[in-house]
Amino acid sequence: NTGALLLSGGTLAGNGVLTLTGNGGAWTGGTMTGGGTTAVAANASMTISGAAQKTLVDRTIQNNGTVSWTAGHIEIDGTSVVNNAGLFDIQVTGNPQWSHQSNAVGSTTFNNLAGGTLRRSVGADTIYLASTDTNGLFVLNNAGNVQVQTGALLFGAGSGTSSGNFAVSSGVFL
């Protein structure tokens, strides 16, 4: 366990669990890999921000608190999983994506669990949770709440299931 993590470059690797228990955690660049889990505890937070490349490879993000994605592209390689039981708030503007763009095969499964909220809350543009080539997938399994309050949220190549709720504000798109 650690109060906060600042990953601004380099690689966070390993097959264990690193649990963030405080506020102020930030992923501003670098790679999370290694088959382990980066966990955000209840009442803790992590921000995904900065223009530097962020790469998620064969790792799980377990969110029980708040994750705010405020800037930058997230590259997926290998098989990655996000288990969201808290708030995952997409606040990016411009053209960032959570996608696969390299030549390696990649996929992300986003499990929005019961009690979890995946929210798009800032920006008028389109944010892609999608693959940009035929080698990658973005799978959404929603048992919680997906809220699009502004702009557009696009789920691309992949599949998924839903027993949860989708709320889309007037004039925005899912």
Image (cartoon, rainbow, N blue to C red):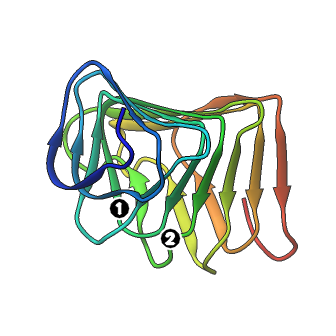
Query: Which of 127/82 is in front?
Result: 82
Above or below: residue 172 compared with residue 25: below
Which residue shows up at 39% across the image and 50% down it? 99
Q: Is residue 135 left or right of residue 108?
A: left
Q: Amino acid at mark 1?
A: His
Q: Position of residue 129 (x, y in %)?
A: 51, 52
Give the spatial CA distance, label 1 vs label 2.
9 Å
**Circle 1: element type:** loop
Mark identifier at residue 73? 1
Which residue shows up at 67% across the image and 69% down it? 121
Q: Position of residue 95 (x, y in %)?
A: 43, 73
Q: Is residue 118 left or right of residue 54?
A: right
Mark 1 neighbour density, 10 Å: few (under 14) some (14–19) many (20 or more): many
**Circle 2: element type:** loop
The answer to whether the residue labelled 1 contacts the one labelled 2, judged by CB atoms less than 8 Å apart, is: no
Which residue lies under the disc numbered 2? Answer: 92
Give whichever of discs 1 and 2 has the lower sequence position.
Answer: 1
Q: Is residue 121 left or right of residue 22?
A: right
Where is residue 84, by image quadrant?
Answer: top right
Q: Position of residue 55 (x, y in %)?
A: 26, 47
Above or below: residue 52 compared with residue 35: below
Position of the N terminus, as image quadrant, is top left
Q: Position of residue 165 (x, y in %)?
A: 85, 42
